[in-house]
Image (cartoon, rainbow, N blue to C red):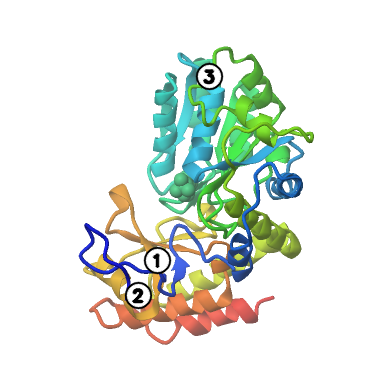
């Protein structure tokens, strides 16, 4: 069946996505409750019922970010839109911003600074290592920087940097901190108020396990002050927080800026309700346990990690591809046989690592065991020197015996 559309060589009909298990760098598996919420009837974006839901959403985001910041809202757009919102609102032409780059996303932050007319002072750390605090301290000393920008959880490498220490360094040098918490939020501690972080953004599709397309951000008092005193208009009309807050701000009067992605916001609301029901600390613990179980299995198989344990992320596991294995062929086979998606390496790490995500709803025992047995079964067909039969028992011990 289907209908004939001019340029399509096959009939077009309703799209039915195949069943998948999402264990890549995002999106993660979306719970049926979130999908059901998104399928509810669309209402007006100025409807009082919708405005009431927005207020709950802001409170739920404050809970997730561990902040009392009033300016805590979901930006309409994916994580990259949250990133841009921070830069276009805080960086003026001519400003110096110290940017920590230890993977793909730090590099993108530097590009954001450039596009705002600012001057990024890029502190490079080798991919696979956390941001070097001493180098950042040195750079901030002489820079008179407006801001320090860094990625808390580098999804391209699986590395966690010391966000608390970096925020403290920024404060000590009178710079605002701009923090990428896209991959970390919900899966490991992100303590906006305790860190004194000034502007933090995240994404809906990683550890929050919502559909992609929304980017929660939170701005603290110093960042809000900067928006007010920056001078000149933000270089993006769409992301200008002065305008956006006319719609998202407190009070019953909401001015139209752009039509909110109504159904997407229902989904984010539901995923945050689920996070609050579980308790955010319990969610962190679940991610940590899933990681420990995966690690036990990966190591029992004889494989190893790119990143040393001390700076390893729980939700993004960079596993070294054994010598001589065609990593893309293995991923294709996992997808075809098991409906299992894992990620490839990026940039210098392409072909060298797999990125196994344990984000949100994907950080559950069934996924860990599926992933280990699927990799073992598939790698076992190659000449890779792996140990078989040990991974699942090792992971099972962590999941169900070491309480
Ligand atoms: C995924 C990701 C982003 C970008 O998010 P999109 O939703 O893909 O735009 C930014 N930073 C980090 C650390 C990420 O993992």
- Residue, far right: 251
10 Å crowding of disc 2: few (<14), some (14-19), many (20+): some
**N-terminal label among 1 and 3:** 3
* Cα distance in 3D space between marks 3 and 2: 47 Å
How far from the left and from the top, in percent, is residue 382? 24, 79
10 Å crowding of disc 3: few (<14), some (14-19), many (20+): many
Q: Quadrant of the C terminus?
A: bottom right
| 119 w.r.t. 64: above or below | above
Write the residue at 57% across / 36% down.
258
**N-terminal label among 1 and 2:** 2
Dot 1: element:
strand
* Cα distance in 3D space between marks 1 and 2: 8 Å
Q: Is residue 307 left or right of residue 215?
A: left
Question: Does the residue tagged 1 have its C-beta within 8 Å of any atom of ligand 1?
Answer: no
Q: Is residue 65 left or right of residue 301?
A: right
- Badge number at residue 334: 2
Write the residue at 65% across / 44% down.
45
């Amino acid at each position: 069946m289907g209908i004939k559309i001019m340029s399509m060589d096959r009939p077009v009909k309703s799209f039915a996505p195949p069943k998948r298990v999402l264990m890549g760098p995002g999106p993660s598996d979306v719970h049926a409750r979130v999908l059901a919420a998104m399928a509810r009837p669309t209402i007006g974006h100025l409807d009082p019922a919708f405005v009431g839901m927005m207020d709950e959403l802001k409170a739920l985001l404050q809970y997730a970010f561990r902040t009392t910041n009033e300016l805590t809202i979901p930006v309409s757009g994916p994580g990259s839109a949250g990133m841009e919102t921070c830069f276009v609102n805080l960086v003026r032409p001519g400003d110096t911003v110290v940017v920590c780059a230890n993977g793909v996303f730090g590099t993108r932050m530097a590009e954001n600074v450039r596009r705002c007319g600012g001057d990024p002072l890029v502190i490079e750390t080798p991919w696979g290592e956390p941001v070097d605090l001493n180098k950042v301290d040195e750079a901030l000393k002489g820079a008179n920087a407006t801001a320090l920008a860094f990625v808390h959880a580098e999804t391209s490498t699986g590395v966690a940097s010391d966000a608390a220490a970096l925020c403290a360094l920024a404060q000590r040098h009178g710079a605002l901190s701009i923090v990428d918490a896209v991959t970390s939020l919900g899966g490991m501690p992100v303590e906006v108020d305790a860190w004194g972080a000034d502007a933090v953004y995240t994404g809906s599709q990683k550890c929050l396990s919502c559909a992609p397309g929304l980017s929660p951000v939170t701005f603290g008092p110093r960042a809000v002050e900067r928006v007010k005193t920056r001078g000149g208009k933000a270089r993006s009309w769409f992301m200008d927080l002065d305008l956006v807050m006319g719609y998202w701000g407190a009070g019953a009067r909401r001015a139209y800026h752009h039509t909110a992605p109504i159904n997407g916001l229902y989904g984010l609301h539901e995923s945050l309700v689920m996070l609050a029901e579980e308790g955010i600390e319990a969610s962190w613990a679940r991610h940590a346990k899933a990681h420990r179980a995966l690690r036990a299995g990966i190591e029992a198989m004889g494989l190893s990690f790119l990143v040393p344990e001390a700076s390893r992320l729980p939700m993004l596991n960079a596993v070294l591809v054994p010598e001589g294995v065609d990593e893309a062929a293995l991923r294709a086979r996992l997808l075809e046989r098991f409906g299992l998606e894992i990620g490839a390496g990026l940039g210098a790490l392409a072909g060298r690592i797999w990125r196994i995500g344990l984000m949100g709803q994907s950080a559950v025992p069934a996924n860990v065991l599926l992933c280990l047995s699927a990799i073992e079964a598939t790698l076992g067909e190659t000449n890779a020197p792996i140990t078989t039969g040990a991974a699942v028992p090792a992971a099972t011990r962590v999941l169900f015996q070491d309480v």
